[in-house]
Amino acid sequence: MPVTIYDVAKKAKVSIATVSRVINNSNVVTEKTRQQVEQAIQELNYAPNVIASALTKKSTLTLGLLIPDISNPFFSELARGVEDASNDFGFNIIICNTDYSLEKEATYTNLLRQKSVDGFIISTAYYNDENVINLLKENVPLVLLGRDIEDSRDYPIDVVGSDNVKGGYIATKHLIELGHEKIACLLGPRQIKVNLEREIGYLKALREAKIKVHDEIIAHGDFKLEFGYQKTIEILKGPIKPTAFFAANDLTALGVIKAVKSLGLSVPKDVSVIGYDNTILAEITDPSLTTINQQMRKMGYLATEMLIKRIKRERTPGKKIVLDVDLTVRDSTFKHI
Ligand code: RIB
């Protein structure tokens, strides 16, 4: 027979309501009673029934995490931070992969709502993302992680991201300081705000150094290796012939390296490559990848902490946290002679 809350109450010689208060961390219980109940829970090896508690407390202690590409290690690192925080605060997570599709995002959002998750951590949002806007309008607790949407006065938005303008700027400045002037820029989808910001940083560095901007070597793709590969071949066969590439994530940068090598050229002697994220891939690729370091786990942790505070109604106004980024220099960038 499974141990119930009645057994715990009987053993601890208190009422069921008192056991429930201890389980729910209520502060109307004296320290002595709390210890009595905790000891009974331990001795009986009692595990509260999550479904029953969900029915009474209207909480499942479960969070939904939406990511666009589970095969990109950037999102594994974010998820790791989310899991660490969930674990620390007694929550579980359900991870859904959307493949950058707004339809899949809508499907998973509905599914997670049917499962009564307490809140959403969303790393899939496009700039004008109606799925997210609808959730906000319905007062569903959520936090945007590494993504942002258009601001609105109608609802508070919680966001944890990093300084993308600075990232684009210091990446490009690093290449300029190595003597490069023709620097290609391979971004992710236009509808995702981080790309707009990384491009602003790239253009700022070029303008500051009075370097001509060539629109022909700026391209938007899908943040995938294949895009980096195909676009690099196309650009290197074109008229401008850049000596360096700034890729807006590590996966795209890996595609750039593959393409440069496939044309019989060397990274970094003929073409320098810089990525973005500082995932594990940056360390193990050959040559190792110079990249912009994002504090991925910290982003995931902070976003989850922020969401849980909102779920518990410990805070209401929208809050934006922007984490710093820095440059990690490895072997894929070299001076232009
Ligand atoms: O969606 C992929 C990318 O978005 C990541 O690699 C990271 O740069 C994030 O902002």
Image (cartoon, rainbow, N blue to C red):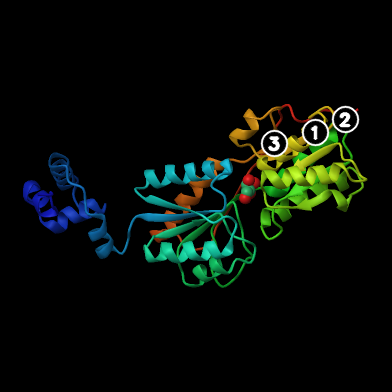
Q: Quick one: label 2, few (<14), some, or many (20+) residues within 10 Å?
A: some
Please give the residue where the numbered disc 2 appears in the rendered image.
Answer: 336
Q: Nearer the viewer, mark 1 or mark 3?
A: 1
Whether the residue under disc 3 has CB within 8 Å of ligand 1? no
Q: Secondary structure at mark 1?
A: strand
Label 1 neighbour load within 10 Å: few <14, some 14-19, many 20+ = many
Amino acid carrying mark 3 in the image: Thr
Task: Report, in whole angstroms, how far the alpha carbon at label 1 lies from the one at label 3.
Answer: 11 Å
The residues bearing labels 1 and 2 have C-alpha atoms spaced at a distance of: 8 Å
x and y percentages locating residue 151 in the rendered image: 63, 66
Residue 189, percent across and down? 69, 56
Residue lying at 46% horizontally and 50% vertically, measured from the top left? 304
- Mark 3 or mark 2: name the one nearer the start of the chain: 3
According to the image, label 3 marks what residue?
291
User: Where residue 106 sits: x, y (%)?
Assistant: 52, 66
Calculate the distance from the C-alpha at mark 3 to the C-alpha at mark 2: 18 Å
Residue 272's disc number:
1
- Left or right position of 11 against 312: left
Amino acid at pointer 1: Ser
The residue nearer to you, when weighing 69 against 75, is 69
Q: Are marks 1 and 2 in contact (CB under 8 Å)?
A: yes
N-terminal of the pair, mark 1 or mark 3, is: 1
Is 332 on the left or on the right of 139, as rendered? right
Mark number displayed over residue 45 = none
The residue lying at 18 percent from left, 49 percent from top is: 30
Q: Is residue 178 above or below residue 154?
A: above
Q: Would you call the spot at circle 3 few (<14 residues within 10 Å), some (14-19), or many (20 or more)? A: many
Element marked by disc 2: loop
Task: Name the element at disc 3.
Answer: strand
Position of residue 284 relative to residue 316, above or below, is: above
